[in-house]
Image (tube, coloured by chain):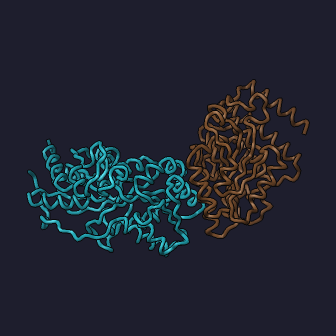
Amino acid sequence: MSTTADVSAAPRIESITDFKRLANRLRIDIIKMIGTAGSGHPGGSLSEVELLTALYFRVMRHNPKDPAWPDRDRFILSKGHGCPALYAVMAEAGYIDKSAMNTLRKMGSPFQGHPDRRFFPAIEANTGSLGQGLSMGIGMALAAKLDKKDWHTFVMIGDGESQEGQNWEAAMFAPYHKLQNLTLIVDYNHIQLDGFVKDILDISPLVEKFEAFGWRTLAIDGHDFNQVIPALETARSAKDGKPTCIVANTVKGKGVSFMENTAKWHGVAPNPEQVAAAVAELEAAAKKL
Amino acid sequence: MSSTTVSNPKTKYEPKMGVATREAYGQALVELGKVNPNVIVLDADLAKSTFSATFEKAYPDRFFTVGIAEANMVGIASGLALAGKLPFASSFAVFICDKGMDQLRVGAAYPNVNAKFVGSHGGISIGEDGPSQQSVEDYALMCALPGFVVLSPSDEFCARALVHRMAEHVGPAYMRTGRPKTAIIYGPDDKFEIGKAKQHGDGRDVAIIACGLEVSYSLEAQALLAAEGINVRVLDMHTIKPVDEAAVAKAAEECGAIVTAEEHLLDGGLGSQVARAVGKSRPVPMEFVGINNTYAESATPEQLMEKYGLTAPHIVKAVKAVLKRKGR
């Protein structure tokens, strides 16, 4: 496919209700995907669904039919273990056939256990060792700035991930070099593998930390499309030299009552009965949308 | 002791001194920057020492010092490469390799990005600063990264040429440069290819396979041995990975004994690479010159190279030891 600057190549959802319906459906995909795989990270996948959906279906300039388009916006999932949500969103957007979701974590699958460009070239960066995505995003944003291109780079980290020191090396660099074409999204779901973030190594006040480092900060409810979309659009259109950090307050395991707000579902796959219960709950919720 | 014919074996080694390989790196970066606008150079507050500052002077808009933050620097290099740039990131070898290891692994090796990394102040020949600054494990670390090319040039001409070769090579690459001025071994017209050793002399008693500063010490050892009627050849194995297996096999076949010499721990460096190539082709006795399971200390470079067994007399000793085992 020829490269094109046609922005309309990006899939676009207009209504908030349609966004909510899609987010609900993607949660079902995620649960089924991880259930079929028999391993994976449901909690941190479910917390990032609205953020990813808003990026791929409204905010980012991209073309699923031409993933190598040089002027596309970039997205790096630094919290690589949350990849089932990214895979579901990218499949929905048309980057790959949805049947790939049945192959998560299986030999040869484009949907590797953590994002891997070698198997799924539309993935922008290999991640999984926490703390590295923001630096890579800075490299991309720097390249765009040097080339005077207007594509934007988005990076998502987890709240627990912000304990990694490399983030703070990177957090110093981006504002100093005026990378307004870079946005960091923190999926602040309050829980990491071993328990609540506040009980392991409290990272608060996170907004103030990024403010002090020179970032524009936006604190939002990461499940409310009415907040997520404007925040991402504000970040993408920044003209004042500041990179943007969106601290998105989220719920780990969002949408599946028995997975919500517990570290238990950080990295455990649901069994078939649990998949059925989760899907039933999500389908019931869909009827109310 | 067997000896084979060599036309006019040199019994004296009196090289002219040139500039350090790190200085040649800076010059080569400028040459690259002139022809390739995609070359971006990063450093972590050691630009004057690594000589990336030479590039900064010529192309300030394409040079970024990231501060003292090597992990971030390696990650930025990966991002630049993924966006189509040709980044060269430099610091001291010990800092870029050791502090940047996970980033080199996940950000560069694993996705096989086209990013280049250069570590100066390799080995113990940096002298007085001591073990925290002396990289004695960079070959091992970088050879352990799948897909990485690992280079250790012996003089300024070798270094300069290899910077160009690593720019042409598509994929991740690492080069170690050194702090001290080096003996001039080559000239501006000598050609270098990644993975192709340079042979000095055709002695058949023993083959010495060396890299970096040890090439010069090996040439000195070659002259000392020639004075005693022992004729050795020296292979400059500037590419540690992929090691020149054909050259190693030929040396094993023709000489029947091999000594390796490197300014690095005996674990996981040139000796290991050569030993594997020897084992796969024509097993022959080997001896290994290198740093033996220890860190060094503060002293002059000369004192350290002597104390830790890396100078020409040590190579001579290893040659004589392997000769005794040859053809048993």
The answer to which of B221 and A178 lies nearer the viewer is: A178
Residue A118 is at least partly visible in this image? no
Horizontal side, residue A89 vs residue B142: left or right = right
Q: Residue furthest top?
A: A273
At x 16%, y 54%, the residue is: B313
Q: In the rendering, what colour is chain A?
A: brown
The answer to which of A240 and B91 lies nearer the viewer is: A240
At x 29%, y 62%, the residue is: B198
- Shown in cyan, the chain is B
Residue B29 in picture, x, y percent from top left: 45, 69
At x 41%, y 63%, the residue is: B50
Against A226, residue A6 (above or below) is below
Residue A192 in picture, x, y percent from top left: 64, 36
Q: Number of callouts in the render? A: 0
Task: Give the quadrant of residue A148.
Answer: bottom right
Horizontal side, residue B60 vs residue A56: left or right = left
Residue A254 in picture, x, y percent from top left: 77, 36
Horizontal side, residue A79 vs residue A287: left or right = left
Residue A113 in picture, x, y percent from top left: 61, 39
The answer to which of A231 and B146 lies nearer the viewer is: A231
Point out the image quarter for the C terminus of chain A: top right
Against B288, residue B61 (above or below) is below
Residue A43 is at least partly visible in this image? yes
Point out the image quarter for the N terminus of chain A: bottom right
